[in-house]
Amino acid sequence: MKKILITSALIFLVSIWILSGCGPKPGVYGKAITETKTTAVSEISASPANFSGKDVRLEGKIVQECPAGGWFMLKDNTGVIFVDLHPTQIVIPQAVGRGVSAQGKVKKEGNQVSVVGEGVELK
């Protein structure tokens, strides 16, 4: 009985150790982030014409993500914005809930405002 308990505890600890290393690693995907000023999502949403075609840096968390890693929804403390990575062919690992910095160009199509991501840094 004691051997079974020790073996079970050892298997549990090894499993936790292995799984803790399987998440997405911090790092930069695409171009390095060079913008120093962080823009709030609410600023972009309030005046998309002022930002259209301009590079912005965003900081927040990934709250939703494409299963293939080609887009994500970034949430900061002022709102949520769609970050599209497809045009730049960047793919990130699954990282919902992780902190993120993103840089790219603001795009407005109809009522939809988004950012075409050129660089993403997972934290």
Image (cartoon, rainbow, N blue to C red):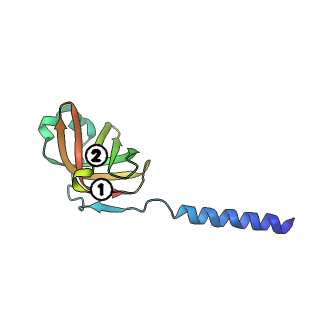
Residue 48, above or below 70: above
Q: CA distance from mark 1 to mark 2?
A: 10 Å
Asked if labels 2 and 1 touch by Cβ distance under 8 angstroms, the answer is: yes
Residue at image coords 13%, 41%: 52
Horizontal side of 89 relative to 24 (left or right) equals left
Percent position of residue 11, x then y: 69, 65
Q: Which residue is mark 1?
A: 120
Which quadrant: the C terminus? Answer: bottom left
Residue 67, above or below 32: above
Amino acid on which disc 2 is placed = Val
Q: Secondary structure at mark 1?
A: strand
Percent position of residue 94, x then y: 42, 53
Percent position of residue 33, x then y: 24, 59
Residue 25, above or below 107: below
Residue 78, above or below 17: above
Can you name the residue that lies furthest to the right here? Answer: 1
Q: Secondary structure at mark 2?
A: strand
Give residue 54's mark.
none
Quarter occupied by residue 44 = top left
Which quadrant: the N terminus? Answer: bottom right
103 vs 78, nearest the viewer:
103
Amino acid on which disc 1 is placed = Val
Residue at image coords 32%, 36%: 79
Q: Which residue is mark 2?
A: 83
Q: Residues within 10 Å of mark 2 (few under 14, many from 20)?
A: many
Residue at image coords 32%, 51%: 70
Quarter occupied by residue 32 = bottom left
Residue at image coords 35%, 56%: 92
Disc with the residue nearer the chain's start (1 vs 2): 2
